[in-house]
Amino acid sequence: MRRVESQNALNGTVRVPGDKSASHRALMLSALAAGESTIEGLSPGLDVSATSHIMVQLGAVRRDETGTVHITGPTSGLRASSQALQCGNSGTTIRLVSGIVSSIEGVHRLEGDASLSRRPMDRVAVPLNLMGSSVTGEGPRITAPLEIHGTSGLRGIEYQVANPSAQVKSAILLAGLSANSITTVHEAVRTRTTTEDMLRQAGVSVVSTDMAAGRSVVLTPGRPRPQVWRVPTDPSQAAFFCVLGLIHARADIEVLDVEDSPERIGFVHVLSRMGADITTSQAASGVTLHARSSQLHCTELHSSEIPSVDEAPILTVAAAAAHGVSAFRDMGELRLKESDRFEGSMALARLLGCRVWSEGDDFYVEGVGGAQHFAPFAINAGLDHRIVMSSAVAGTAGRGCDIDGADTVSSSYPGFFDDLASLR
Ligand code: S3P
């Protein structure tokens, strides 16, 4: 159990860790390339370490220098490991590695922790099996442990992703690298472009066309080339400190050098609409976000504004501190994250003293009109790093909290509580 005390005033600057999405992909594309790549700013989280271990198990070589990681991909390509591939808590690891090993001859076993083993893998199994892989798991939703029979004879497919997901899109594109024809992925909502951008940087032909709210991505098979990767900092982690700066009664917080692609930075627009005093200024890499104490008012927010809905739990805390009823629309995907964040976000708002209710995939939060009115609370974070950080923000701005399972924060942000303490 970790105690989080309420604070009188918060002031300072934070640099959040390297983006988890870009970190996973930097390791994977480096391992797939023939020769040595360099990665600067890799996320220190356990999720990314899981990916790193797996790349080494498959034949890549890792060498660390201060602040820099060198990955050498074998010229002859990755090969199957006789040991199970441990994906830990990380959905990105298991889904993207499924795509990679689908094209590696042999049998691959992918395992996860209790949280990951509850999450549906049918969303990657179905397209990968269409490409000629054989992905099997437990039950109708194909949960981990997964057994994958990889083949060097994958076929390119044209595939419409049912529930827009960067992980599913990426798994298909990574498998498509060694398919015998082009692969096309259609998504109805534009999700983060990390995979496409980094593949392009590594010399692979990826053509994206935006249409209406969605996007089509066409990948021509090819091998990534070794690169120097500079990982930007993680906007979804920056969101915690922005909301803290806004809902705390006496706060002034700057978050440095945040990646600001349209699919990642939607939370800033949502907060601005809520009346937040949040400014963005161009920085050397990305933007600096500056958040100052604000009286927030309610808003209506659709999942497509924050694709992948990573920021929904912390925006729930913002809504809890606002005046009026906020509506969170089309949030069904939240149920399939590290924990059921649909129920978890509502439960957190309820603990803070809000009236909360749901209708189908929408939920509503009636704010208490300021974090000073939050109730003190105790919560079990249920192996979910974002529930830990959202709770810690609410407790710091409000009247304190106790978090059971706070260590789970290490999956993405081991230094979170130190960075939080540095603002006192
Ligand atoms: C991620 C995709 C997202 C997100 C996760 C990271 C990625 O999930 O929740 O934190 O790196 O591709 P979706 O697959 O639902 O978009």
Image (tube, rainbow, N blue to C red):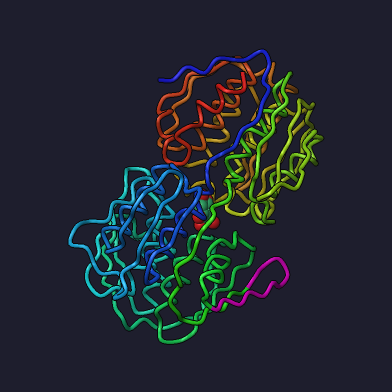
User: On the picture, is 268 further left or further right than 413?
Assistant: right
The quadrant holding residue 236 is: top right
Residue at 45% over, 58% down: 38
Specify start and end residues of the magenta stretch as a single range.
Answer: 205-215
Q: Residue furthest left?
A: 82
Residue at 48% over, 72% down: 173
Residue 169 is situated, as x and y percent measured from the top left of the image, at: 51, 66
Residue at 32% over, 83% down: 153
The answer to whether residue 239 is magenta is no
Judging depth in this view, the residue of 231 and 133 nearest the camera is 231
Judging depth in this view, the residue of 330 and 181 nearest the camera is 181
Q: Residue furthest front?
A: 65
The chief SS type of the magenta part is strand
Residue 342 is situated, as x and y percent measured from the top left of the image, at: 54, 41
Number of marks present in the image shown: 0
Judging depth in this view, the residue of 227 and 137 nearest the camera is 227
In this view, 4 is above or below 96: above
Residue at 59% over, 63% down: 193
